[in-house]
Amino acid sequence: MKRRYDMESKVVFYHVIIKVPDNTLDNHAYAFNHKHKSYLRDLLFWLESIYELEVVNYCIMSTHAHFVIRRDQNSKLSFKQVAYRYKKYKYLKEAPDARTCVIRKFAQRLNDLGDFMANLQKRFAAWYNQQFEKRRRGQLFNHCYKAIQWVNFPRKRKR
């Protein structure tokens, strides 16, 4: 099911929550230790450097994480900049030609919150599943992330 977001506002903020189920391997109380939290934070900022989303604030706890993400509707990147980000994303030695269909399709993904979160969760789960002697399999996070959209901010009252 595709989420419906506000498409009229130029800048939108989302409060995103991801949660780990309670039955993680070898640790029923806490899923993430300091090493896991650090990797999730590093992965979050690496993906932020590729996507056109800005992580305004974050809090990573032992069983869940909160992110405040700013999304600007208007893309400001040229196809040459998108090609450079594609190179970084795919770990290529050289950036591909900016005129290709691959770069144009990738440019459409760069402002997509759903794609950003799917990428974050898949990459982190793949890394996390390999961290134990007895290998974990399957999804790590609960069904889907929860995103609460903030469009209209309360204004300060005049006194």
Image (cartoon, helix red, strand yellow):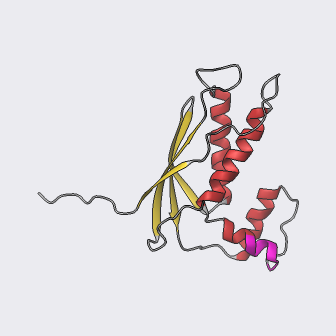
Identify the residue at the far right of this view. 93
**Position of 149 compared to 84: left or right?**
left
**Position of 34 compared to 128: left or right?**
left
Magenta stretch, main secondary structure class: helix
**Position of 93 compared to 57: left or right?**
right
Q: Is residue 11 visible?
A: yes
Residue at the (67%, 45%) spot, across then down: 121
Residue at the (78%, 30%) spot, across then down: 136
Front residue of this view, candidates 41 and 30? 30
Q: Position of residue 93 (x, y in %)?
A: 88, 59
Q: Is residue 103 in the magenta section?
A: yes
Identify the residue at the far bottom of this view. 99
Location of the N terminus by quadrant is bottom right
Q: Which image quadrant is residue 30 in?
A: top right
Residue at the (54%, 32%) spot, across then down: 61
Q: Position of residue 34 (x, y in %)?
A: 63, 27
Bounds of the magenta segment:
99-105
Query: Please, is residue 93 above or below residue 139 in the view?
Result: below
Q: Position of residue 114 (x, y in %)?
A: 61, 58
